[in-house]
Image (tube, rainbow, N blue to C red):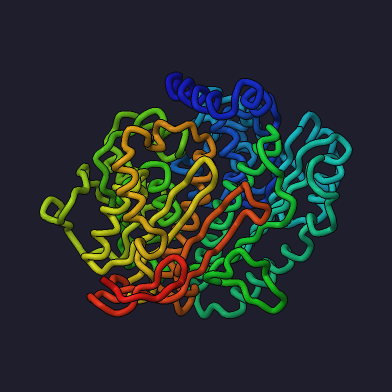
């Protein structure tokens, strides 16, 4: 753990500089939450060595996990022995967070609710405040404190099927009533009332509730990573601060980043659509593990992994998945973790093997419903895409970078292939020609990977669901999904049109290039 902590410090130091790292690690982050969404907003800071206060009065759910750590027997920091105190999320999460950092005193659990009393006591000394409740009264109290003390304040709300966030700091516009996110709590309450009224039997009710909670968790995972990135950028003054709301709604295809409009219904991921599906992950580093985690939490039936690398110290910074697996083969570590993370619902096998040209060296044990590409070089990503084209299997290819992320889907007969979509073949050839100049993400100084990969994993899981059931969750995006913190809007869906020869599984037909020009396919 000491070596891991030194590696984490080294990468953050090289990326943020001495002053930036000092500002980050001398900050105090208070996370106010009322559901398990809170862990996804607090963990990115705890793993970066930032002191975190976890403020909540909510209780743990049965069999709840923090990544793969079971927190329900946690010490609450005050040596209290009663079970009721131990099972409060604030205390239990604080203890569990200590498993991911050498300094196990970084996270402190505080039982309390904002908006009623003791605001100064709960938040005193906090220069970063995150309220991810759906309670406008709590958000108003947090905002009042932030404006009074000059703290960075991020307001987020996460409900089944929808979430949004907004940042307030000295460099952003004067916050409006929108930051209180009024009405989302009532919308969530109505959603669960409808479940209670429509479920015909206890099994159906349990499945609907689990589906709703799984979708909420997916959205919290996505927004938590974005929140950490935006807060750190505002803290160190790196780029233009976020000055508008960001949204994410599940099951709306290319409109996933649009706000929820009046009358639109919340869509949730039906776990029954996932439990008989199998995914193979090509590369399980920062991107692959977060995508595997998200799909395991969403209830996919099988998640296998292929990787010929071992876990090194840099992997621990870029994913919480490997905090206790340094020097273990990645594919094997992945296969050990997935069943635990899924609560036993997802089977997993690891293949400690390299993906090479051709198919002779890779004989798969079964037919997979989807491939997920988490490789960190264009050459390896092209090999994975080639395999998908040969097998006529959908593939989701994704990359988490220091300056954001991108996710692309290839679904035979429904989207462009990866070459027509974003010229992956050209990028791979250029990378090969300039090999001496290219470093993998294991060598690059990219601290944002540690939290942006969290967001990438959630988008990959949502995209996988759309390839399985486009009738329910919208067609997979024919184009690119990306986050660019250099641009004011931040989140984009770049939709392209048409299909190509490869996507239709035949030679000939029409090829649509990046500029939308149609030509004969070669």
Residue 168 placement, left or right of 304: right
Using the image, determine if residue 422 lies above or below residue 496.
above
Q: Where is residue 179 drawn, in percent x and y?
A: 78, 55
- Residue 71 visible (yes or no): no
Quarter of the image for the C terminus: give it.
Answer: bottom left
Q: Where is residue 71 drawn, in percent x and y?
A: 52, 39
Q: Quadrant of residue 41?
A: top right
Residue in the image at 52% along x and 34% along y = 447
Q: Where is residue 266 drawn, in percent x and y?
A: 61, 72
Residue in the image at 24% along x and 40% along y = 308
Quarter of the image for the N terminus: give it.
Answer: top left
Residue 161 placement, left or right of 187: left
Q: Where is residue 38 drawn, in percent x and y?
A: 62, 46
Q: Residue at the right extreme?
A: 148
Q: Which of 511/392 is in front?
A: 511
Residue in the image at 45% along x and 64% along y = 463
Q: Which of 270/84 is in front?
A: 270
- Residue 285 visible (yes or no): yes
Using the image, determine if residue 435 lies above or below residue 78.
below
Q: Which of 256/414 is in front?
A: 414
Numbered disc total? 0
Residue 186 placement, left or right of 492: right
Q: Quadrant of residue 501?
A: bottom left
Residue 286 placement, left or right of 170: left
Using the image, determine if residue 60 lies above or below residue 162.
above
Residue in the image at 15% along x and 55% along y = 358
């Amino acid at each position: 753990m000491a070596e891991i902590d030194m590696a984490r410090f080294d990468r953050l130091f090289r990326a943020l500089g001495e002053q930036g790292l000092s500002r980050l690690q001398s900050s105090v982050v208070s996370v106010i939450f009322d559901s398990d969404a809170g862990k996804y907003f607090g963990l990115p800071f705890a793993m970066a060595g930032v002191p975190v206060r976890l403020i909540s009065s909510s209780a743990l759910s049965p069999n709840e996990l923090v990544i793969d750590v079971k927190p329900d027997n946690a010490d609450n920091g005050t040596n209290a022995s009663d079970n009721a105190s131990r099972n409060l999320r604030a205390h239990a999460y604080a203890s569990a967070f200590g498993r991911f950092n050498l300094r196990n005193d970084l996270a402190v659990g505080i039982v309390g609710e904002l908006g009623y009393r003791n605001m100064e006591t709960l938040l005193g000394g906090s220069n970063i405040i995150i309220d991810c409740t759906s309670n406008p009264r709590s958000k108003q109290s947090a905002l009042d404190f932030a404006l009074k003390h000059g703290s960075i304040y991020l307001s987020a709300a996460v409900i089944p099927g929808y979430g949004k966030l907004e940042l307030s700091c000295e460099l952003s516009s004067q916050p409006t009533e929108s930051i209180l996110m009024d009405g989302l709590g009532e919308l969530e309450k109505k959603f669960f009332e409808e479940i209670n009224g429509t479920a015909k039997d206890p099994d159906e009710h349990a499945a609907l509730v689990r589906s709703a909670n799984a979708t909420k968790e997916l959205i919290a995972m996505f927004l938590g990573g974005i929140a950490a990135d935006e807060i750190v950028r505002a803290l160190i003054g790196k780029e233009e601060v976020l000055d508008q709301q960001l949204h994410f709604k599940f099951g709306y295809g290319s409109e996933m980043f649009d706000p929820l409009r009046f009358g639109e219904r919340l869509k949730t991921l039906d776990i029954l659509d996932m439990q008989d599906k199998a995914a193979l992950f090509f590369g399980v580093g920062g991107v692959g593990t977060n995508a595997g985690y998200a799909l395991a939490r969403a209830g996919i039936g099988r998640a296998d992994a292929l990787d010929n690398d071992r876990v090194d110290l840099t992997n621990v910074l870029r994913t919480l998945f490997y905090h206790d697996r340094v020097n273990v083969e990645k594919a094997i570590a992945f296969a050990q973790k997935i069943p635990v993370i899924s609560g036993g619902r997802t089977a997993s096998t690891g293949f400690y093997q390299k993906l090479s040209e051709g198919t002779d060296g890779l004989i798969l044990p079964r037919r997979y419903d989807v491939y997920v590409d988490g490789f960190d070089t264009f050459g390896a990503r092209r090999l994975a895409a080639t395999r998908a084209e040969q097998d006529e299997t959908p593939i989701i290819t994704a990359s988490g970078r220091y300056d954001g992320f991108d996710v692309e889907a290839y679904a035979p007969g429904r989207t462009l292939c990866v070459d027509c979509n974003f010229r992956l073949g050209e990028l791979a050839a250029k990378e090969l020609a300039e090999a001496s100049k290219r470093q993998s993400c294991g060598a690059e100084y990219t601290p944002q990977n540690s939290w942006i990969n969290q967001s990438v994993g959630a988008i990959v899981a949502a995209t996988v669901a759309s390839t399985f059931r486009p009738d329910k969750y919208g067609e997979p995006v024919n184009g690119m999904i990306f986050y660019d913190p250099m641009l004011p809007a931040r989140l984009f869906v770049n939709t392209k049109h048409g299909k190509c020869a490869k996507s239709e599984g035949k030679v000939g037909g029409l090829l649509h290039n990046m500029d939308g020009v149609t030509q004969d396919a070669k």
